[in-house]
Amino acid sequence: MNNKARIFISYSRQDDAVANNIYNALKADGFQVFIDSEDILSLEEWRPRLAEMIRSADVVLCILSQASLLSDTCKWELEFANQLNKRVVPVALEDVGADLPPTIAHINYIPLYGNVVFEPQLEKAKFAFDADIEWIRAHTRFGELANRWVNKIGTELRGKDLRNAIDWLNRQPNNTPDPTPELKRFIAVSRRKARRNMGLNLIAVVSIVIAAGFIAVLQKQRASLEFAKEQQRIARQARDLATRNPEEAIRMALGVWPPAASTQESGPMDALNAVSTAIANQRLRVHITSQKGPVLHAAFTPDQQYIVTAMNRQTVQLYDAVTGASFGKSLNTPGPATTFNFSPDEQRIAVASGKNVIVWDISSRVRTGTKIENNVDVSAVTFTPDGKTIVTAAVDRALRFWNPDTGKETRPALQMDAAIVDVFFGGDKGSLLVVTGERVRIFDFPSGTEKRDPIQHVGQITRADISPDGHSIVAAANNMVGVWKFETGLALLEPQPIYPKGTEIGSIAFSPDSTRIVTVSTGKTVLMSSAENGNEMLEIRNSSSRFTQAAFSPDGNRIVTSSEAAAHVYEVALGLHRRLGQTSAHDSLIEASLASAVPYERSLMSHNREITATVPEDNVVALESTSSGRPISNRTLYHSGIVSSVAFSPDDRFLVTAADDGSVRIWDTQSSLLLFMLRHPGKPIDTSLSADFTDEGQHVVTWRETDDIRVWNVNLPGGNLMQTACLVLPFKDGYRTIVPPVRNTDEVTTLQIDDCSDYSPQMPVYHE
């Protein structure tokens, strides 16, 4: 079976040569391609045939040119594709300006003109074709069935097809075209008719066997059984999805909770297993949908209350950092808002937009001073440490210095010998760092003289940053990252690849504690790595669109990313460890934990004396009710090594166990399910490993007799397991939602979660 997308090419006859070249290239790569010159017979009625081809296609490739924008046929093709909610991928043969048809004005087109190379640009289009192709292919198939039903040449969905359609609706990936109203109505009517037929069949059978007075009772029992079966099926799917798509697994598990009374015990256990696995893997906390084109830059405000986004459609917008809800009116810019920076006093924001820089007061969102007008496009902007001057880098390789109040230059421009990628202050705060070509050049400010030899990378630098402590510079070139000591320029980490060959790093930033770096590749990947050795600490993938940039929150616990269609906030501190001595705050946590640690025994009672943890075998831990002596559940807590430490969290919600092989595991005491698997590696001479919670319960400290001490962030929201799962479910544009598997309405919609405490505080115990 060919899993590639089916493509319809929309083009003007004046661009016939280019369209045929694209057609041949796509055909050679295995795509099924529809084009009117190949697929419409000479005597065939062209518009119905075009409609049939567009309806059969998964994606519409729109070839933009001045001729196509004037073509009535091209306009009709786009409008018809929009009616069907088809994915549209535009490519431009020339500069077509900003006045595009409304159906594609919000889409960032791929240029095939200027100095670009044809093949790589076409590869970008191919990548867009096949994104979420299984869901897109189903969109096409169900759309064709809906059209046949509307035209009375097809029937409603039944049986497996209907269940698949409902699942398909509930599992829509981000940045995919919505089902059409016609398609939603087709599925809703199919569901209604299926329920009616089920009821009629039941009535017919029961009326023969028993009196009519019992029909309603039997119908209710059957409906209850069907509902329970559906819950069990959804719970199994959630369990299977928990690792590769934790967000969807949590949504599905919450949607079947609490379980129906008639549900077999395996159903609730599948739902509990799904969320216990998904909680540690679920990093996404906030999804912010862009209504103004691609998000080019995103960052937390210094107080962490808001996310600021700069968008391609001349807009800067603030969002609540917790819920993703938009805050206040947007700030309009003369052109695309490409990047921004905050003032040292954290009161203002300078936004680069085309040739201009505009400064706003953050709290009032009122423009301050005079608009800075450069003579060429601005590529980077920053404030001087005293906040009295704005420094801009422009595409003419010049640094310029501006008074933010008057908008006037304060001194002559500083010319570079290569394109300027970025500019920032750092180190002793009197140093101006300029990223240009393969170097990071360091200038004295305000004299403008170069202080010493530049830092030299192995390739063209795409991004760089200076650590908040002022001691290190990190720079990326191609797929390689290197770290240098600011004071001497000596390499602390020699440039090394952290992404596959052929990948380019488009963004890089230090964490606030200067120990980690976050990078974005040209693919759909964000990596958090150690600044000390470059080792990967966390990988985040985006299945729907490419990341463009990433930055840490001021506390270092989250990162915000921008992408082609959205901004996202991810939790990155969960499960992260630091060694003793990295921060004074963590040192105090460790010291308090070591002082209050309880010596290991093979039996330990919880703080509230309701649960007892025992070690009946060397690699086994069991949880029992203190009052009854019965197990909390039939689940056994296994370790790979010999258990050497057991401890409860202060609220008795979690249990941490450690073994001599370095394995550390954190369990939910209400369900005996595993939440975290951590590892504290040791040396051959090391023996026992100890672990305990800190007094505030948000960290776990592990230590060996050799004084190798580490502290781990395990800060999870409170409540029972389902409430925790609900609380780690991401907000999308201000709301959390779940998708119930069975509803008494015809419309397939999501339900908003207003209060996660709705998931009963008393967790029922199920035995396998």
Image: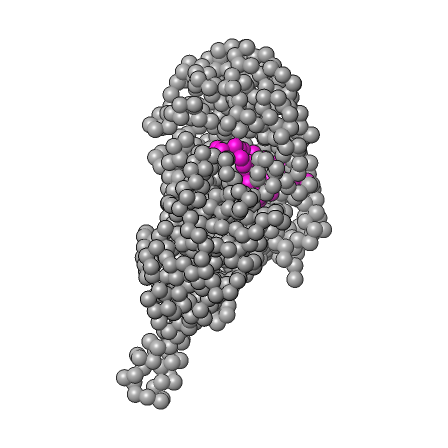
Residue at image x 48%, y 39%?
A: 559
User: Residue 634 is drawn in which quadrant?
Assistant: bottom left
Q: Locate residue 326: give its quadrant.
A: top left
x and y percentages locating residue 57 in the rendered image? 58, 55
Residue in front for this viewpoint, 430 or 566:
430
Q: Which quadrant: the C terminus?
A: bottom left
Is 285 or 650 nearer to us in this picture?
650
Residue name at image x 37 percent, y 28 percent = 362
| 179 inside magenta stretch | no
Q: Is residue 124 left or right of residue 549?
A: right
Can residue 521 be found in the magenta stretch? Answer: yes
Is residue 423 or residue 333 the one in the foreground? 423
Residue 230 seen in this snapshot: no
* Residue in the image at 39% along x and 65% along y: 624
Q: Nearer the viewer, residue 408 or 203?
A: 408
Q: Position of residue 542 (x, y in %)?
A: 54, 47
When the figure is inspected, residue 39 is found, relative to residue 69, above or below; the finding is below
Residue 554 picture location, percent across and down: 44, 34
Q: Quadrant of the N terminus?
A: bottom right
* Residue 200, percent from left and from top: 37, 78
Check the image and name the residue furthest to the left.
213
Q: Range of the magenta residues?
A: 502-528
